[in-house]
Image (spheres, rainbow, N blue to C red):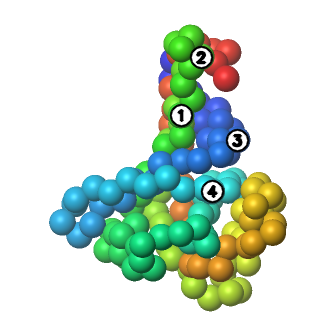
Amino acid sequence: MRMTADQAREKFAAAQVAALATVDAEAVPHVVPVTFAVSADTVVFAVDDKPKTTTDLRRLRNIAANPEVSLLVQHYEDDWSRLWWARADGTATIHEVAAERASAVRWLCAKYPSYTERPPQGVVVRIEVARWSGWQAAPSAT
């Protein structure tokens, strides 16, 4: 069953991790997991302190080349009547200045206790969602 935009946003916002899909200038796709926070039709994520092989992240290079992105969250159970997914499609911008990062970092700290102890210090990506969509196996899927 197709979800309404409001249902998709609600389920999306409650999830803990999303898959971020970006493409580079040659349309080569790249998908990575991200922690995120939602406020209205804005999704944010930050580059945090978790170990990475480089600070020159492909997701950021891709967004600079092509800011159109998708984020996907999903719920799986062996009881397939409880399956669902929700997606946010939008335009991403990268924010490096502290004043531009502040509200996003607050949203992330409110959602994730680990960020309260160690707030993200890296850039913040803000996605203005143009389309929320989703699907659920049954009206009461959780």
Percent across and percent down for residue 110 are: 81, 59
Residue 14: tell me if it is visible: yes
What secondary structure is marked by label 4? loop
Decide which of tag 3 and tag 1 comes sooner along the chain: 3
In this figure, which residue is indicated by the disc labeled 3? 14
Q: Quadrant of the C terminus?
A: top right
What secondary structure is marked by label 2? helix
Q: Are marks 3 and 2 in contact (CB under 8 Å)?
A: no
Other residues around mark 1 within 10 Å, as few (<14) / some (14–19) / many (≥20): some
Distance from disc 3 to disc 4, alpha carbons, whole Å, reads 10 Å
Other residues around mark 3 within 10 Å, as few (<14) / some (14–19) / many (≥20): few
Decide which of tag 3 and tag 4 comes sooner along the chain: 3
In this figure, which residue is indicated by the disc labeled 2? 82
Distance from disc 3 to disc 2, alpha carbons, whole Å, reads 16 Å
Please determine whether, in this image, residue 132 is positioned above or below residue 126: above
Q: Nearer the viewer, residue 61 or 128?
A: 61
Decide which of tag 3 and tag 2 comes sooner along the chain: 3
Distance from disc 1 to disc 4, alpha carbons, whole Å, reads 14 Å
